Image (cartoon, grey):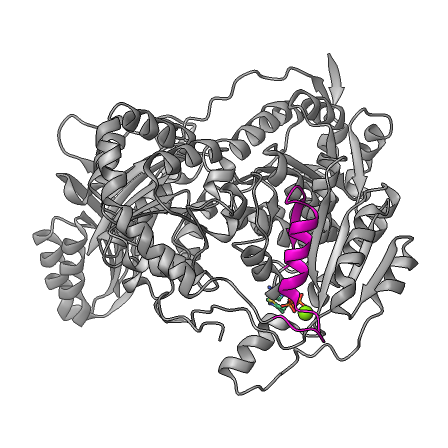
Amino acid sequence: MKHTISVLVENEFGVLSRISGLFSGRGFNIESLSVAPAMDPELSRMTIVTTGDDRILEQINKQLNKLISTIKVLDFTSEDFLQRELAMIKVATAPEDRAEALRIADIFRAKVIDVTPKTYTIEITGVPAKIDGILELLRPMGLKEVVRSGPVAIGRGAKGVNP
Amino acid sequence: MSLTGSQILLESLKLEGVDTVFGYPGGAVINIYDDLYESSIEHVLTRHEQAAIHAADGYSRCTGKVGVAIATSGPGATNTVTGIATAYMDSIPMVIITGQVPTQLIGNDAFQEADMCGITRPCTKHNFLVKNVADLAKTIKEAFYIARTGRPGPVLIDLPKDVQVAITDFNYPDQVNLRGYKPTYSGNPRQIEKAAEMLLQAKRPVLYVGGGVNLAAADDELLKLAEQTKIPVTTTLMAMSAFPQRHPLALGMLGMHGTFYANMAVTECDLLIAVGSRFDDRVTGRIDSFAEKAKIIHVDIDPTSIRKNVEVDLPIVGDLKDVLGKMHGYLNQRVGLVEDMVESTEEWRATIDEWKERHPMTYRQTKSVIKPQYVIEKISELTEENAIITTEVGQHQMWTAQFFSFRHPKSFVTSGGLGTMGFGLPSALGAQMAYPDRQVIDISGDGSFQMNSQELATLVQYKLPVKIAILNNNYLGMVRQWQQMFFEKRYSQTVMELPIDFVKLAEAYGATGLQTSKVEEVEDVIKKALETPGPVLMNFNVSREENVLPMVPAGKAINEMVLAS
Ligand SMILES: Cc1ncc(C[n+]2csc(CCOP(=O)(O)OP(=O)(O)O)c2C)c(N)n1
Ligand SMILES: [Mg+2]
């Protein structure tokens, strides 16, 4: 099962390799990983999407917590949470496809952020499934390049991860 | 007070109570060595950086203090890695200082540069690269704190050369504040009560004790709890000296080379109380049949140990001294119930006694050739178990665990998790530095001995009276045993074709060498070695193809043992 985990870590030298080394050294999966400074500039917040059964997830949580640089770990899976991913999609647009591409972007509330005679570059945010959805529709036109940020997550309601 | 980085290092070590360090100099630590030149800290010059780490490790294992070692950058630092991994696997508190190239050269493939923080990340509890001298004192404080608290482990500090000479105001912090590191010491009282209740209900309980008991210095609490409840105690390799092995409740070691009765007891028990042990594969054998009939209570300071390998009915995270002490206290207020429990487990202990009688730990004595087990029994007897015993890795290590009747806490120093050949001699050196007046003996194999034999020089130079007993079978015996049992006796690369004259080797270093191939001389050789001042190497030419038994073949359940005939 897929799990989205938020990890608050010291924003210091080598911390990313401590986390990624933990996953590779113990044979845990990383499906996606995004990192950026947290509210407190001395901390970074990572969002990790991983898979595994309950036992593996329990180990992942415990092992992450065990790292000296880790301040807090939150597995969102059993919580009510919001998830967003950003993607930029460069799609080939033959003349007969250009109107259709715009229509699709519109339906998904995506934006065209760059235009050339033969391509559109489309920006979209949403849950990962939504991005999968637009890619599915654009694919027949010819995807030239796709970058996805990997999801970031935040809990619903008043509770937060930040200390 | 304005000090250089290297002065700050030494002052901080003193404030941490360090009086002995082990190490080896080089360009990237030359400033530290310059300050050591007239420091009150004693520095022991080993002949290899790996040995310096093992020595600091041995020092720590028998004292409980943090072991400290120093090495230079590049090759000096990479030589420490096996030692650090050895300490990491057995959770030994150490601080390792490595020199590093100047900060502005880091990443340039500079002369003798190695990315030590990168290399040791998976085998240290934590590591630091200090880029600014202003952070140094705080970093050292944190390193010692991290090394010795929670589940202990080695911590590396990589110290660039320019930081060693940079000057700053020295203030040693008296507190650490690590937001992300707050180990749990106090066991949850509700869980402890539940555990005690489970214990009172058990008909066939067993305590399964690991190295955590050494680390927590909880041997006393363990003994009290075991005697109060009369629960039999089986110990892992790491915990052989944490419980007196001649005690009627002692079952000896369990697992791959465990005793028949320990493995049977674990297989048949209805309650397994795991304390400071981690269900290692060498202990459990086939995991799904390990303690199959039992409810499991697991007490450990490290939450990741719990439910890593097996499902647990009752987890307790906490310090063993605290948890076992509280359990004992709780039961002390329920004397009547404890008496009932002791009575209703009478039958269980009788069953175990039958197992003990049916398959005791034995070997076949001969008159013509020395049995390695016999040498170990004799060492045990003649030292009255007052010695600190270290071992290398192989058959001799297993026989030591099986046949030496340990009775003092922290008196058995052996590489369990990593199984590092070459560990025994340097760790004996470290133990002897810690206890100049105690007898320290390295029980060694002919193969392992050659992995750090250069440390004979260190023993002689520092007048360390370590005794070495090589059980010489002219084989990499443990591997040979596997080849005999599972590879049709195809002894691929396990025959030590070149017999070494170990007596001459000892003499070349200025140590005493003794040897025998005769059963009737074994006692005399040991006595003579114990009486001779200074380091003595004893070479015992032993029965060459003796096997370590019982043995649980890989992949089998621990009650499926090959027994001594
Ligand atoms: C550094 C290292 N290399 C290889 C091994 C694999 N190994 C385990 S036991 C053993 C044989 C040890 O031979 P010896 O020291 O003579 O002890 P014996 O088994 O003969 O008592 C070997 C090669 C190891 N444990 N450590
Ligand atoms: Mg051998």
Q: Is residue B66 left or right of residue B245?
A: right
Q: Is residue B158 left or right of residue B461?
A: left
Q: Quadrant of residue B471?
A: bottom right
Q: Quadrant of ligand 1?
A: bottom right
Image spot of residue A49 (x, y percent): 27, 51
Image spot of residue A47 (x, y percent): 30, 44
Question: Which one is in front, B247 or A27?
Answer: B247
Number of callouts in the render?
A: 0
The residue lying at 73 percent from left, 28 percent from top is B19
Question: Which one is in front, B209 or A81?
Answer: B209
The residue lying at 41 percent from left, 26 percent from top is B179
Question: Which one is in front, B316 or B345?
Answer: B345
Quadrant where the N terminus of chain B sits is top right
Q: Is residue B224 above or below residue B230?
A: above
Question: Which one is in front, B238 or A27?
Answer: B238
The residue lying at 76 percent from left, 42 percent from top is B23
The residue lying at 64 percent from left, 28 percent from top is B132
Question: Does the magenta segment cover residue B370?
Answer: yes
Residue B337 seen in the figure: yes
Question: Does the magenta segment cover residue B347?
Answer: no
Image spot of residue B533 (x, y percent): 86, 44
Q: Which residues are magenta?
A: B365-392
Q: Is residue B186 left or right of residue A52?
A: right
Image spot of residue A36 (x, y percent): 37, 38
Q: Is residue B497 above or below residue B244?
A: below
Q: Quadrant of residue B495?
A: bottom right
Residue B271 seen in the figure: no
Q: Quadrant of residue B130?
A: top right
